[in-house]
Structures are given as C-alpha cells and as structure tokens.
Image (cartoon, rainbow, N blue to C red):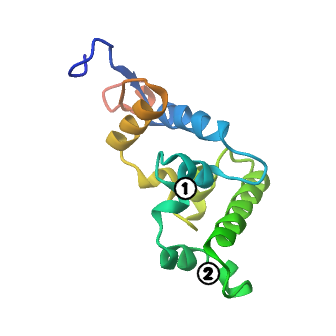
Amino acid sequence: MLEKHSSRAVQPMTRPQAIDRIRKCLSAGETEEQCACVVASRYGMFCGGFSRLSDKELRQRYHWIVRKHPGVAREELERLASLYHVGRQQATGCALCCDVETRDHCGCDGWNSFDSRTLESVCRDMTGELIQIVESPASSADEKV
C-alpha cells in the first residue's frame, strides 16, 4: 500500500505500537518537572497539551489545585499541574502523563482521546513514518487458535 504523493510504503502496526512510537518522541522532551503536556504545548504538537485549554477549562480540570491556590496565574497552574503529572507518573510507573490520564481522566482522557486515524497522522508528523493502524493479530476474529 502506498500513500498518495509518496514512494514510501505504509507500515502496518497495532495501536499500542503507534502509541509507543509517539510516547518515545514525547518523553524525549520531558524533564523532571515538565510532563508531556508541557512538551506538546511548547512545540505545538500532538494534542497541544495545556495550550489547547482555555484559562477557564484549565482551571476547571485542575480545580483542586485552584482551590488550594486561589488566583493562581495560568503559568503557575500549568507548572503545578505538570508537577502533579510527573508525580503520578513516578507513583504509577507510567511512562507519560498520557498513560496516567488514560486511566485517571483528570486533565484529559489520555490516549483514549485519539482515534486510529489521528494516531496515524500524529505518528507521521512526529516520526516521519507512514503507518496504518491494524487490528492486533491476537485479537483478530478470523484467527483460529
């Protein structure tokens, strides 16, 4: 299979494989105090991180931080939310806050926010790889054990 206007072959991969490729790109930009949301915001990639949220949405999603810090400036709220995410990553052993959010649904829905076509596009934009997400062979209804 070839993508339009390209001589590169489209590589089939499962959703978890595509997510792993994206995860590696995002984690390369993380620091001990800055989660993937900060990286995505800084470079305008993937979901857009904190920058995709209005001030009101950000304050609503991290209401427990705002409650403890009334009048907190957006920049500081983002810093505190990032520290929260980094802490959750460390506590759960997850690679990225996207992994944590897939389970916790605090700031977003993590990987669940993206359909397969979106992940294909993000993977292409971040890695240069042309991929098509396919069903995992183990879960194929046609496969007989």
Locate the N terminus by quadrant. Answer: top left
The x, y position of residue 44, in whole percent, is: 48, 48
The x, y position of residue 25, in whole percent, is: 58, 35
Foreground disc of the pair 1, 2: 2
Assess disc 2: are there few (<14), some (14-19) or many (≥20) residues with their C-alpha within 10 Å of its C-alpha. Answer: some
In the picture of the structure, the residue carrying the numbered disc 1 is 102
The x, y position of residue 120, in whole percent, is: 37, 35
In depth, the one of 110 and 58 nearer the eye is 58
Label 2, secondary structure: give it.
helix
Q: Which mark is residue 140?
A: none
Mark 1 or 2, nearer chain start: 2
The x, y position of residue 65, in whole percent, is: 69, 78
Disc 1 marks a residue whose amino acid type is Thr
Q: Which mark is residue 63?
A: 2
Q: Is residue 30 left or right of residue 4?
A: right
Q: Who's the residue at 54% across and 73% down the image?
A: 58
